[in-house]
Amino acid sequence: MFDVKLDRGASLPLHDQVAAKIRRAIADGEATPGQRLPPARDLAAVMDVNTNTVLRAFRVLRDEGLLQFGRGHGARVSGTPQRELVHARARDLLQLARHHGYRRDELVAIIEQLP
């Protein structure tokens, strides 16, 4: 499913490289919404990294809205990179609003007033 070659000499941490491989698989349609990913330990073995590295990548992708976890169900694809982009922009907007003293509810009210 995933290109398993990681660049151990790269400045990009291994967990970010693993996340990028999974992100690319989702973007290319190799992993589709609802599809269950292989267990972290299996991916770790194939990619020759520690299981914690894959789990950290999974958490990054969950925070981006690309994966979801279910007890006993493993990691499933829940979104697409386009959805990730919207989530990233929303997080950026929330951070900007907080920087300028706005609370989340105030930001939501501003968004709701937009045409």
Image (tube, grey):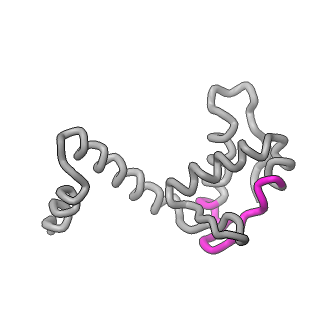
* Residue 53 quadrant: top right
Q: Which residues are magenta?
A: 26-41
Residue drawn where x is 59% and y is 62% of the image = 67
| x and y, in percent, of residue 71 in the image | 67, 69
Camera sees residue 90: yes
Residue drawn where x is 75% and y is 30% of the image = 8
| x and y, in percent, of residue 80 in the image | 53, 63
Q: Residue furthest front?
A: 71
From the viewer's side, name the closer residue of 80 and 95.
95
Q: How many marks?
A: 0
Residue 110 vs residue 14: left or right?
left
What kind of secondary structure does the magenta stretch mostly adopt? Answer: loop
Residue 67 vs residue 4: left or right?
left
Residue 3 vs residue 107: left or right?
right
From the viewer's side, name the closer residue of 86 and 40.
40
Q: Residue furthest bottom?
A: 34
Camera sees residue 30: no
- Quarter of the C terminus within the rendering: bottom left
| x and y, in percent, of residue 87 in the image | 41, 57
| x and y, in percent, of residue 31 in the image | 67, 65
From the viewer's side, name the closer residue of 85 and 69.
69
- Quarter of the N terminus within the rendering: bottom right
Residue drawn where x is 22% and y is 59% of the image = 105
Residue 69 vs residue 85: left or right?
right
Is residue 32 one of those drawn in magenta? yes
Is the residue 17 above or below the residue 11 in the image? Answer: below
Residue drawn where x is 51% and y is 54% of the image = 63
Is residue 90 one of those drawn in magenta? no
